[in-house]
Amino acid sequence: MLRIDQAMKCGICKAEMEEKTVSYTEDIEQGVIVIRHVPAHVCTECGNTWYSGTVAAQLEKIVDKFAATTGSEVSVINFAKSVA
């Protein structure tokens, strides 16, 4: 378990990770889904991005929902509004 006072380290280069919001892109059969403002940990050195298990599950649900209903080649979705 990660303690509050511990800095998260990158699994690739071992540099520190920082909390940010990022855009997540998923290429699906019908087109592309872009989910903006996704909370993530991003490596300050190599740029590796890590999502918590909760966020990853929410991303999967959003992609599944929009993949089944979207009629456009590109869909841009706000993460916070989609999980509210």
Image: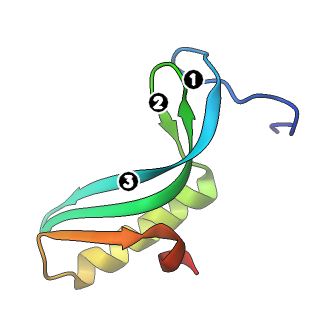
Task: Provide residue 46's location: percent of width, then percent of height.
Answer: 45, 21
- Secondary structure under badge 1? loop
- Secondary structure under badge 3? strand
Task: Provide residue 72's location: percent of width, then percent of height.
Answer: 13, 77
In three-dimensional space, the C-alpha distance between marks 1 and 3, rounded to whole angstroms, equals 19 Å
Can you tell which quarter of the image residue 83 is in? bottom right
> Mark 2, mark 1: which one is toward the viewer?
2
Amino acid carrying label 1: it is Gly
Q: Residue at x 57, y 59 (%)?
A: 55
> Mark 1, mark 3: which one is toward the viewer?
3
The answer to whether mark 2 and mark 1 are in CB contact below 8 A is yes
Q: Which residue is mark 1?
A: 11
In three-dimensional space, the C-alpha distance between marks 2 and 1, rounded to whole angstroms, equals 8 Å
Residue 24's disc is 3
Q: Which residue is mark 2?
A: 48
Left or right, 48 with reference to 20:
left
Residue 54's disc is none
Amino acid carrying label 2: it is Asn
The vertical placement of 69 against 27, above or below, is: below
